[in-house]
Each structure stands twice: as structure tokens, then as C-alpha cells.
Amino acid sequence: MAFKNIIIAVDNSDEASQVVSAAKEIASKDDVSLVLMTVVRPIMYTYGPEQAGLMTMHYVNFEEEAAKAAAENLETLAEQHSLTCKKVTVVGQPAQEIRKQ
């Protein structure tokens, strides 16, 4: 079975590098388009409504900053693997956002 597109969905864990390596190996066998993606969960889902409310009062741009840091991590990961591809960082529910791609 030949793939045309592969979404490499990663988080900021140590295993992310292994996932990228495996996807690169699969992609090297065919002409495959790669997308390196990460999803930042909304603060409400990560901390719960009460804690999220307190956090947003003190730090309004929490999700923006988390998404910016995640995008920078994707760039670093791509550079480490000499990966030239589209990079996507979104805020949302991981399963839903990955399916949208």
C-alpha cells in the first residue's frame, strides 16, 4: 500500500523524535507529502473550568503562548531530522484537529 500523505502528529515528548524518524523512513519509499503537526489542548480541557478561570485572569494569552512554544518545538524537531514539510500547530482537541488535516 502506497501512501500519498502522512500526518506526523507529535507532542512534546521524547517519543516525538522516534515518530518523525519512522514517518521519514516510510515516506522515503514513495513520493509522499509530509505534514508535521501538533495540537495544543485548550486551557479549559487541560486544567478544568475553575483552574482555567483563575489562570486566564492572571495570564490572558496562555493558549497563544503555548501554541507559539509548540510551533517552535515543531521547527526544532524538523531541523533535527532535516525535514522539509508543512508544519501545523493548532489549539483544539487532538483527535478532532488531526482528522481535519
Image (tube, rainbow, N blue to C red):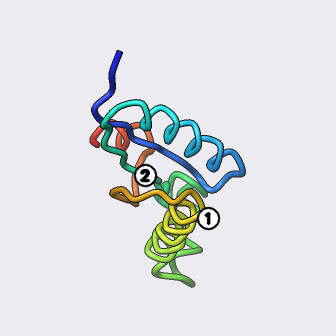
Which labelled disc corresponds to residue 61?
none
Q: Is residue 49 above or below residue 9?
A: below
Which labelled disc corresponds to residue 51?
1
Count residues near mark 1 (Cα–Cα under 10 Å), then give few for <14, some for 14-19, many for 20+: few
- Determine the residue located farthest toward the top in the rendered image: 1
Which secondary structure lies at badge 2?
strand
Q: Is residue 99 above or below residue 39?
A: above
The x, y position of residue 70, in whole percent, is 52, 66
Q: Residue at 31% of width from left, 43% of height from top?
A: 33
Quickly name the residue at label 2: 37
The x, y position of residue 85, in whole percent, is 36, 56
The x, y position of residue 73, in whole percent, is 56, 67
Cα separation, mark 1 vs mark 2, equals 27 Å
- Amino acid type of the residue that numbered disc 2 sits on in the rendered structure: Met
Which of the pair 28/19 is nearer the observer?
Answer: 28
Work out whether mark 1 precedes mark 2 in sequence or the reverse, and give the earlier one: 2
